[in-house]
Image (cartoon, rainbow, N blue to C red):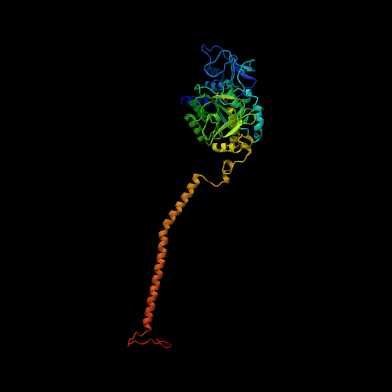
Amino acid sequence: MAALAAAITVLFAAPAQAAPPANQLYYTVTVSYQSAPENLWEIATRFLGDASRAGEILDLNAGRVQPDGDRLADPGDLTAGWQLLLPWDATGAELHNGPLPAGAGSSSGCARSSDTPAEASWAQTLLTPSRAWPVTNGAGVKVGIVASGVDGSAAELAGRVAPGADVVAGAGRGDVGCEVAGTNLAGIVAGDDDTFGVAPGARIVPVRAGNQARSAATGISVAVAAGAKVVLLGVGADASDADVRAAVSDAISRDVVVVTPAWAKGEAADGLLRVGAIGADKQPAFPYAAESVDLLAPGTGVTSIGGVVSGDEYAAAYVAGTVALVRAAHPGLRAADATRQVLSTTTDRLVNPVAAVNTALPAGVGVNAAAAPPSSGLGTLSRVLLWIAVALAVLLLLPFLLRRPARMVTGVARRRWALRQAQRARARLTADHDDPFWEAPVSGPGRS
């Protein structure tokens, strides 16, 4: 929990890195200032008038290789001779305005996403994600990459890598490393190079995590907390571990799609995509069990996992980029529906970014939800309440309805009884009944 809290603090405290212009204000760090070692808070106070703006200076410089080959990671630990870029409104006699001195602030020695194996170009040709870009390029979607960290200064990712977090260290950023694997995964997901990059408009949230299940689980939670709508598990953690499984389930419950390599052994679930790799020959890189893999994607490069050669991590990155395209094209689509859209548009189980974006959603899903009859629990409850109201109304009216016919029947019987009595009386008046004194009534004119 402490590592998670520290990582989330870094995620939300530091703004996103942006590529500096060729001409920029910069300051050369000295051995000391006013008899004390220099730090970013003091520099922000001196040149910007506000110590709280130290984060802006950190943002401009984190990830840049300094003249001595080191990088700025700790605002309180600066080295004399470092060239620090400053915001445009900084003022001071010690500042320089112009291009940095040759070799200062370069990123030489750090692996680039362009170092991805050359086979990446065949994958781009096979999937042709650029044909989906007229609809969307993934803009507005954050993709969390839980791996070894990402080189945020890579030109192919410029301006699209968030600070992220370092779960292994428990503090610090995830975008200042030189690790090849994580940077390559980010390049496949969102690189804008001609030979690779599925969703170049997406934003990467790099989370540096180790291969231990607990750090991988924390990394997933950190990526979700940072607002990622897609999380790629790119470390060698076992996804069947209880901690990782719980983190995956929690992410899905928060409307996040999780993508894992097939070897991670994740359990099937809506909202989870388990990816196997194919080679340039379009054949699976490994005889995957049908129940362990949801779909396939190009596996550019190889990684040794327990003695098994596999490119599953790279394949998973292509799928994560595809999910980013789908979620950008359909912002209201839930995680489970996004995974179904990707799966339903595969070609022979191979991910198809163009079809995933351009194929209409099924009736009842996303924008087509109005085309289907309501099936929500709320609608069912409304119908039940309506029938209960009708039943109560009938029960209340039934006694009244039953009494009225009874009164009608009783009234008819009484009238019939009175008629029969009148008929009997008339009969007595018109018959002698052997009465010697009886005389029939005389009728006719003149009688009164």
Displayed quadrant of residue 87: top right
Vertical placement of residue 432 versus 168, above or below: below
Vertical placement of residue 370 versus 131, above or below: below
Is 56 or 420 nearer to us in this picture?
420
Is 355 or 268 nearer to us in this picture?
268
Q: Residue at x 40, y 65 (%)?
A: 406
**Where is residue 264 shown, x and y percent of the image?**
53, 29
The residue lying furthest to the left in this view is 436
**Where is residue 98 shown, x and y percent of the image?**
64, 18
**In this rendering, would 368 be left or right of 425?**
right
Q: Is residue 387 visible?
A: yes
Quarter of the picture containing the C terminus is: bottom left
**Where is residue 57 shown, x and y percent of the image?**
56, 21
The residue lying furthest to the front in this view is 287
Number of numbered callouts drawn? 0
**Where is residue 105 shown, x and y percent of the image?**
61, 17
**In this rendering, would 45 be left or right of 133?**
left
Q: Residue at x 63, y 20 (%)?
A: 24
Is 128 or 161 nearer to us in this picture?
128
Q: Is residue 232 visible?
A: no
